[in-house]
Amino acid sequence: MAFLTDRKRAIGMGSAKTGTEHHWQMMITSVALIVLIPLFVFTFGWILGSPYEEVIAYYQRPFPAVVAILTMLVGWFHFRLGVQTLIEDYVHGLARKIAIIAMICVSYAAAAFAIFAIVRIAL
Amino acid sequence: MADVNRGNRPLSPHLTIYRPQLTSITSILVRITGNALIVAGLMIVWWFVAAASGPEAFATANGFVTSWFGDLVMFFSVLGLWYHSLGGIRHLVWDSGRMLDVEKSELAGQMMMIVAVLMTIFTVIVL
């Protein structure tokens, strides 16, 4: 008879394979976004709808550019954590793994494209 | 025997049997708004990439983002963003061990809805 304690049987069977680190990173990014989101909404919203030359000149200024870079970096990382929780609740089996991997790729790709673009405009 | 009843245990009652409550609705809305922000998020990424690519690409992306459809998405995303932010603050307060009782949670839920609408009106007027 194989001897398995209840603890041994439960370890590694959680939906996310990890919990506290995910939650802690969610807390860090939430606090950062409380500051970043209002700054981004009112800088990005301010220039949205302006002509091309004005947009380029605006994002060559350090403050709007750094706010946009940080918001894209932290925001997409926060999204990557949140969407993982969503998938874990509603998708099961192999489809869950595929969905989580796909959405993590989308999140990091979105952040990378946005940050590259902002840096290219700014420099 | 460690594994008597694996996979055949009774499940806890799920969403469908509960009467909707303010606390459950505000919580579900936090999830919906947060994940729905991918639409506006990807539109903004496209807008930045287009601006970095040149005037023609920018004209296409900017035209889409500032069209009536883009405006509609951005309007609801601002509403969702403020609501989700307030929901996040409520979670941080909860995580600190405060406002965990039903009355205060419901008050916070009502405040989230009202303040999110007010902040959206403010944002639309300012921008």
Image (cartoon, coloured by chain):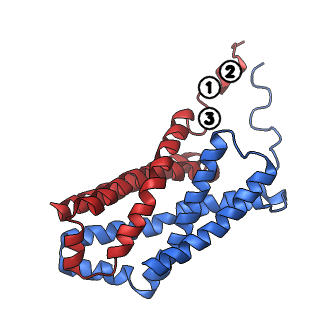
Chain colours: A red, B blue
Name the N-terminal-most of marks 2 and 3: 2
Against B20, residue A88 (above or below) is above
Q: Which residue is mark 2?
A: A7
Disc 2 residue crowd, few under 14, some 14–19, many 20+, Cα 10 Å: few
* Discs 2, 1: same chain: yes
Q: Is residue A46 left or right of residue B53?
A: right
Q: Which residue is mark 1?
A: A11
> Which residue type does callout 1 highlight?
Ile
Residue A98, percent from left and from top: 48, 50
Q: Which mark is residue B107?
A: none
Q: CA distance from mark 2 to mark 3?
A: 12 Å
What kind of element bears circle 1?
loop
* Discs 2, 3: same chain: yes
Residue A113 seen from this side: no
Q: Is residue B83 left or right of residue A79?
A: right
> Which residue type does callout 2 highlight?
Arg
Report the residue that reaches farthest toward the left: A123
Residue B64, percent from left and from top: 36, 82
- At horizontal 60% and vertical 39% (from top left) the residue drawn is A15
> Which residue type does callout 3 highlight?
Gly
Q: Quadrant of the N terminus of chain B?
A: top right
Whether label 2 touches label 1, CB < 8 Å: yes
- Total marks shown come to 3
- At horizontal 55% and vertical 58% (from top left) the residue drawn is B85
Against B16, residue B101 (above or below) is above
State which chain disc 1 sits on.
A
Residue B30 seen from this side: yes
Residue A2, percent from left and from top: 69, 14
Nearest the viewer among B117 and B49 is B117
Q: CA distance from mark 2 to mark 1?
A: 6 Å
State which chain disc 2 sits on.
A
Report the residue that reaches farthest toward the bottom: B68
